[in-house]
Image (cartoon, helix red, strand yellow):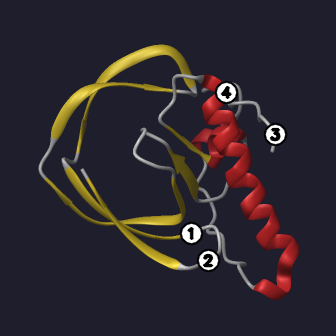
Amino acid sequence: MAIRKIVVLGEDEVLRKRSRRVDKFDKRLRTLLDRVRQLLDDMLETLHATANGAAIAAPQVGILKRAVVIDVGDGLIELVNPEILRTEGAVVGAEGCLSIPGRRCTVERPEKVVVAAQNRDGKAIQLEAE
């Protein structure tokens, strides 16, 4: 694992670009699968090294792939190609972003969300969270 540099808003246009799907999970393409796993491992290590982050997305480490790692203390969540299927309600709270250091603002988020994604092995998963 490796700690990657977090891209800061204004340094690189990667944060404003659309990420690409991770399409290659084929076990025969072991190198590509290993790269996805390595990216997720590096994102987790980078997140933990910041000591103040709850989640990190691949573009925040300069990779235009649809992948996110979330660790809010209830167990690690890794989502590849996440898609929001359903939301419910709304909550307002203060949030920060690793790519905008030193700034916090009040944002509105869904109270509940259902997400479809793939895990690090390409298996389809569905997650319901509050």
Mark 2 or mark 4: whose residue is earlier in sequence = 4
Q: In this rendered view, identify the residue nearer to me: 98 or 34.
A: 34
Q: Which residue is mark 4?
A: 49
In the visual, does 121 lie left or right of 112? Answer: right
Q: CA distance from mark 2 to mark 4?
A: 26 Å
Q: Which residue is mark 3?
A: 2
Residue at x-position 17% and y-position 38%: 91
Q: CA distance from mark 4 to mark 1?
A: 23 Å
Residue 122's tag is: 2
* Callout 2 crowding tier (Cα within 10 Å): few <14, some 14–19, many ≥20: some
**Residue 36, position as x, y percentages in the image:** 73, 63
Residue at x-position 11% and y-position 50%: 89
**Residue 11, position as x, y percentages in the image:** 70, 25
Q: Are marks 3 and 2 in contact (CB under 8 Å)?
A: no
Q: Of the residues shown, which amino acid type is indicated by label 3?
A: Ala
Q: Of the residues shown, which amino acid type is indicated by label 4?
A: Ala
**Residue 105, position as x, y percentages in the image:** 33, 20
Mark 3 or mark 2: whose residue is earlier in sequence = 3
| View extreme (top): residue | 102
